[in-house]
Image (cartoon, rainbow, N blue to C red):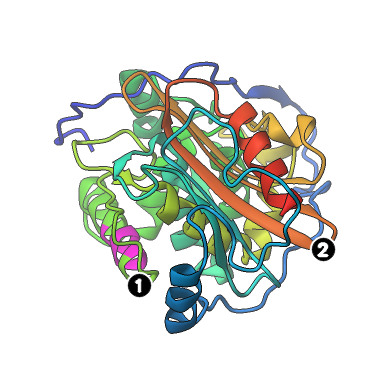
């Protein structure tokens, strides 16, 4: 992507560096420790006419079928760009609460990588295909100050391993490797541009009207944006993919890959999502942060056979506390 300007460079705060080790013995690649897969039911939006009539009859800010628990009509948070939906049985969704700016398009930082993963997972037959790490992937991270999975030149990782590397430590190097591998074209720039076109086509198909991608990882060229409503819906659709749901629930992932010199490289990637350790029932999904984009978080949790999915975009503070308050409010209704 060296031929494109990057006016909105991200400098991610608190990015965790991956741990890499090289040893002599070659061991089989494993993906142990993955969580139980999410439901595989196809995604269908709630009937729009029913939803419209429900919303017209319901007070603003309340779920149309929420019991009267005496809880306030909105969660007490600072973020305006926020949204919460009830995923119901996993195949349907229903709005529970929308912040004052839930439909305003703003920079979404690394939550972009949810769509990157969703496009890749349209081709599950390639999950075990190996991708060789190129110097361009490492250079991209260095040039942009991006979060990294610290992929080493010449190592061969599977697509599934790269998904872990992208979604847990938020590795921009892994995101670039996937975009380069799943785009079409004779050059790297052409392949990445094609991949971004696939991302936008998928957003259009999902009805994400406030979303546009000009980036595979969140480092914007000037028009990489989404809304809290769109990101919550995107997160819900991604969680219907068992591989995705398994990955984003993992706190720490250890794996190994063939290195360029024929030995074995060991990688350890830690999830940037603190909710997994601090909120009971948390399922993921993806963090994002940048000097200009602020803090973003797409999150999900399950309690009492209910799954809630929400999003906070462009917050001026760490979003984890607000996400916990939104979820508490949601489960109380």
Residue 20 in the image, given as x and y percentages of width and height: 66, 23
Q: Is residue 147 left or right of residue 226?
A: right
Q: Main secondary structure of the magenta part?
A: helix
Report the number of discs: 2
Judging depth in this view, the residue of 41 and 303 nearest the camera is: 303
Of marks 1 and 2, the one in the foreground: 2
Residue 186: name its quadrant. Answer: bottom left
* Residue 198 among magenta residues: yes
Residue 242 in the image, given as x and y percentages of width and height: 68, 64
Provide the secondary structure element on which disc 2 rests: loop
The image quadrant where one finds the N terminus is top left
63 lies above or below 301: below
- The residue located at (67%, 50%) in the rendering is 330
Q: Which residues are magenta?
A: 197-203
Q: Which residue carries the number 1 mark?
A: 205
Report the disc number at residue 305. 2
- The residue located at (74%, 42%) in the rendering is 250
- The residue located at (73%, 62%) in the rendering is 67
């Amino acid at each position: 992507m060296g031929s494109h300007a990057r006016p909105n460079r991200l400098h991610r705060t608190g990015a965790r560096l991956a741990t890499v080790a090289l040893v002599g013995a070659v061991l089989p690649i494993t993906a142990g420790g993955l969580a139980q897969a999410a439901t595989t039911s196809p995604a269908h939006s709630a009937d729009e006419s029913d939803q419209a009539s429900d919303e017209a009859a319901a007070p603003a800010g309340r779920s149309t079928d929420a019991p009267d628990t005496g809880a306030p009509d909105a969660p007490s948070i600072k973020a305006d760009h926020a949204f919460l939906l009830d995923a119901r049985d996993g195949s349907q969704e229903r709005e529970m609460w929308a912040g004052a700016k839930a439909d305003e398009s703003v920079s979404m930082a690394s939550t972009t990588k949810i769509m990157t993963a969703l496009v890749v997972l349209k081709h599950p037959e390639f999950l075990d295909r190996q991708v060789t790490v190129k110097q361009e992937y490492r250079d991209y991270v260095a040039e942009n100050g991006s979060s990294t999975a610290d992929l080493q030149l010449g190592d061969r990782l599977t697509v599934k391993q790269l998904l872990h590397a992208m979604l847990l430590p938020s590795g921009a190097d892994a995101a670039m490797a996937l975009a380069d591998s799943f785009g079409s074209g004779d050059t790297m720039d052409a392949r990445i541009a094609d991949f971004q076109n696939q991302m936008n086509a998928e957003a259009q198909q999902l009805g994400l009207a406030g979303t546009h991608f000009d980036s595979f990882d969140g480092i914007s060229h000037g028009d990489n944006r989404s809304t809290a409503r769109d990101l919550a819906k995107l997160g819900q659709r991604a969680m219907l993919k068992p591989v995705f749901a398994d990955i984003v629930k993992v706190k720490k992932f250890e794996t190994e890959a063939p290195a360029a010199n024929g030995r074995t490289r060991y990688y350890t990637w830690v999830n940037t999502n603190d909710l997994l350790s601090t909120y009971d029932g948390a399922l993921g999904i993806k963090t994002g942060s940048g000097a200009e984009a602020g803090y973003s978080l797409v999150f999900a949790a399950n309690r009492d056979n209910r799954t809630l999915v929400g999003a906070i975009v462009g917050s001026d503070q760490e979003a984890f506390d607000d996400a916990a308050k939104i979820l508490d409010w949601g489960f109380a209704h």
